[in-house]
Image (tube, rainbow, N blue to C red):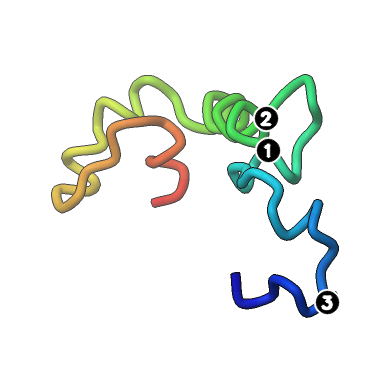
Amino acid sequence: KAFDGLDLIPSEILWRPKEAFSDGVAAKTKSLFQYMQEHAETQVSDTDLQRAATLYPFNTPKTKEAFLYR
């Protein structure tokens, strides 16, 4: 609302619906979220994820993507 009526941002941009960040930076056929999950799947094995609690006892990653970030 702070920019409404100031002609700094076109109304169609100012009032468009919000999108998730990944929707704005990925292809229409596959979201950034899907790319990240696929990448994590190739980098973190099932065995790695099973050992997550031993490696990271505090705030243990529960997904391969979370494990990859740690």
Q: Residue at x 66, y 36 (%)?
A: 32
Answer above or below: position of 24 versus 30. below
Badge 3 crowding class, 10 Å Cα cut-off, few under 14, some 14 to 19, many 20 or more, is: few
Q: Earlier in the sequence, mark 1 or mark 2?
A: 1
Answer above or below: position of 37 versus 66. above
Q: Earlier in the sequence, mark 3 or mark 1?
A: 3
Q: Residue at x 47, y 31 (%)?
A: 44
Q: Which residue is mark 3?
A: 8
Spot occupied by residue 59 in the image (x, y as percentages of width and height): 20, 49
User: On the picture, is 25 further left or further right than 52?
Assistant: right
Question: Which quadrant holds the N terminus?
Answer: bottom right
Labels 1 & 2 near each other (Cβ < 8 A):
yes
Task: Residue type at mark 1: give it.
Answer: Asp
Q: Residue at x 78, y 55 (%)?
A: 13
Q: Which residue is mark 2?
A: 31
The image quarter containing residue 31 is top right
Q: Secondary structure at mark 3?
A: loop
Q: Which residue is mark 1?
A: 23
Task: Residue type at mark 3: give it.
Answer: Leu
- Mark number for residue 38? none
